[in-house]
Image (spheres, helix red, strand yellow):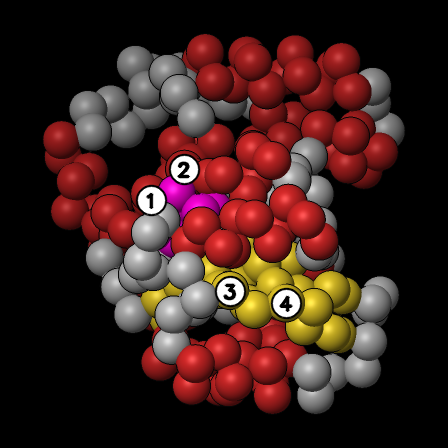
Amino acid sequence: MKKLRILLADDHGLVRRGERVILQSRHGWRVVAEATNGREAVEKAIELKPDLAVVDIGMPELDGIEVTRQIREAVPNTKVLVLTMHDSDQMVSRALKAGADGYLLKSDLTNSLTRAVKAIAEGKRFLAPKVYEIVVDGFLKTRSHDQPEDRAGTQTTPRENEIIRLLADGKVNKEIAALLKISVRTVETHRSRIMLKLSLNSLADLIHYAMRHGIAQSHRS
């Protein structure tokens, strides 16, 4: 595992201390800054450009969803792990749409924080087991309102399913091109065709589709 520079953003000092102890117990991982509110988190992310930010949703000045969105726009190479007490599928969906690479409940902090950070640092997406099940349950409850199970009868090809899986796994176009030994332009063409064929509007929609159809990998172990 390469060296990791980490930003912690949470308005509770006790939580930040706990995160710091857990993370800095790993060789090569270093907490480079802490923020006590959302605005400070964005400012420090822009200034220090950490590899990863652990962001609480319920912070003053800017909430964690907006912090995630602003960090991902201003410092695209900084990954974001949302750490929160909120366990609704709507909140998970909002976090993913804002650009979060992972979603972890504070109740899982001790057991899963290092696992989540490691997965995200390796370019994967991470949903803790309980979060994953919450999201799937949310999809099942709304499934009847989602209209066509197969999106107007369309079917994706094996190659398209492979690309959907890699996108849902957090891979960017360049990484997918290297893994599949095709050009970046070909990946972009496949991606556009998939979004159009399935009537999807965002990466979050694509992840939801992949989960619903058993295409996505859920990094739960």
Q: Which mark is residue 33?
A: 4
- 188 is higher (above) or lower (below) than 2: above
Q: Which mark is residue 93?
A: 1
Magenta segment main secondary structure: helix
For this rendering, which residue is in front, 20 or 216? 20
- Residue 54: image location, x then y, percent: 53, 63
Q: Secondary structure at mark 2?
A: helix
Is disc 2 in contact with disc 1, using a CB cutoff of under 8 Å? Answer: yes
What type is the residue that disc 4 sits on?
A: Ala
Residue that label 3 marks: 35
- Residue 50: image location, x then y, percent: 70, 56
| Residue at 42% across, 54% down | 38
Q: Nearer the viewer, mark 1 or mark 3?
A: 3
What type is the residue that disc 2 sits on?
A: Lys
Circle 1 residues within 10 Å: few <14, some 14–19, many ≥20: some
- 156 is higher (above) or lower (below) than 8: above
Image quadrant holding the N terminus, namely bottom right
Image: magenta residue range: 63-68
**Alpha-carbon distance for marks 1 and 4?**
27 Å
Picture quadrant of residue 3: bottom right
Is disc 3 in contact with disc 2, using a CB cutoff of under 8 Å? Answer: no
What type is the residue that disc 3 sits on?
A: Ala
Q: Secondary structure at mark 4?
A: strand
